[in-house]
Image (spheres, rainbow, N blue to C red):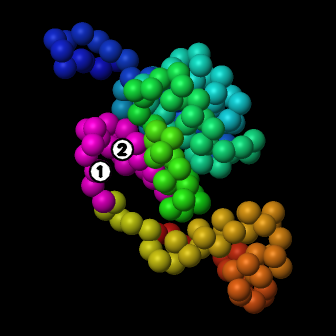
């Protein structure tokens, strides 16, 4: 519960978090609960749509790629039940096309993983029509490259040869890159 600006009345800030990474989802749920959000979680498109219909949340944070489909379907369902809700799309596989699609469907912002709770809260609570501040520590070029390679690898169903062909790189080079941990920033 938080104090309302209209005279001290208490209001809730319902938040639906949707991500198939259950460990990350639970950590974010805990962090957002500490920021006075009433948090509900979902780990799939189907579960998220059911929760959206039940609670019609004020806010939502939705991962783009879920095990059973696209987070864009969740954004559409959220818009149907709560047209004035504020939705942030979150993904580790960001690209311009999906960012544009998310915003056209009604998301107010599009953040790349790993986004912290402060950045997510700032995006959710940013005044209407105001651009959020640029990130303090944007992803490095190495991290962006690594994310792109991972995305293509996943889209090729983890087939190294096909991924290497599509990225126009030698298969052994790709294997070395995939064997390494992601760059920190």
Instruction: Give percent across and percent down for residue 130.
Output: 25, 46
User: Does the magenta portion include 128?
Assistant: yes
Does residue 29 sit above or below 134 in this rendering?
above
Q: Which residue is mark 2?
A: 123
User: Does the magenta portion include 49?
Assistant: no
The circle on residue 183 is none
| Quadrant of residue 12 within the rendered picture | top left
- Please give left or right for residue 144 compared with residue 3 in the image: right
Instruction: Give percent across and percent down for residue 78.
Output: 54, 29
Going 75% across and 89% down the picture, which residue do you hit? 170
Marks 1 and 2, how far apart in space? 6 Å
Q: Nearer the viewer, residue 72 or 63?
A: 72
Does residue 90 sit above or below 165 in this rendering?
above
Q: Which residue is mark 1?
A: 132
Instruction: Tell me if I can see residue 28 in this picture.
Output: no
Going 32% across and 36% down the picture, which residue do you hit? 125
Going 59% across and 29% down the picture, which residue do you hit? 77
| Quadrant of residue 53 within the rendered picture | top right
Instruction: Tell me if I can see residue 35 in this picture.
Output: yes
Q: Over which residues does the magenta segment extend?
A: 108-134
- Element at label 2: helix
């Amino acid at each position: 519960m938080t104090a309302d600006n209209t005279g001290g009345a208490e209001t809730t800030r319902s938040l639906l978090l949707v991500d198939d990474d259950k460990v990350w989802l639970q950590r974010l749920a805990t962090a957002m609960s500490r920021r006075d959000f009433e948090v509900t979680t979902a780990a799939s498109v189907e579960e998220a749509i059911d929760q959206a219909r039940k609670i019609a949340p004020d806010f939502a944070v939705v991962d783009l790629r879920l095990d059973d489909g696209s987070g864009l379907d969740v954004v559409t369902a959220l818009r149907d039940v709560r047209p004035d809700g504020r939705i942030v799309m979150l993904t580790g596989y960001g690209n311009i096309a999906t960012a544009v699609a998310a915003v056209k469907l009604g998301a107010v912002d599009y953040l790349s993983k790993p986004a912290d709770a402060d950045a997510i809260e700032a995006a959710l609570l940013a005044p209407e029509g105001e651009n959020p501040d640029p990130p303090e520590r944007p992803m490095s070029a190495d991290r962006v490259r690594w994310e792109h390679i991972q995305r293509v690898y996943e889209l090729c169903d983890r087939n190294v040869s096909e991924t290497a062909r599509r990225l126009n790189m030698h298969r052994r080079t790709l294997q070395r890159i995939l064997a390494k941990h992601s760059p920190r920033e």
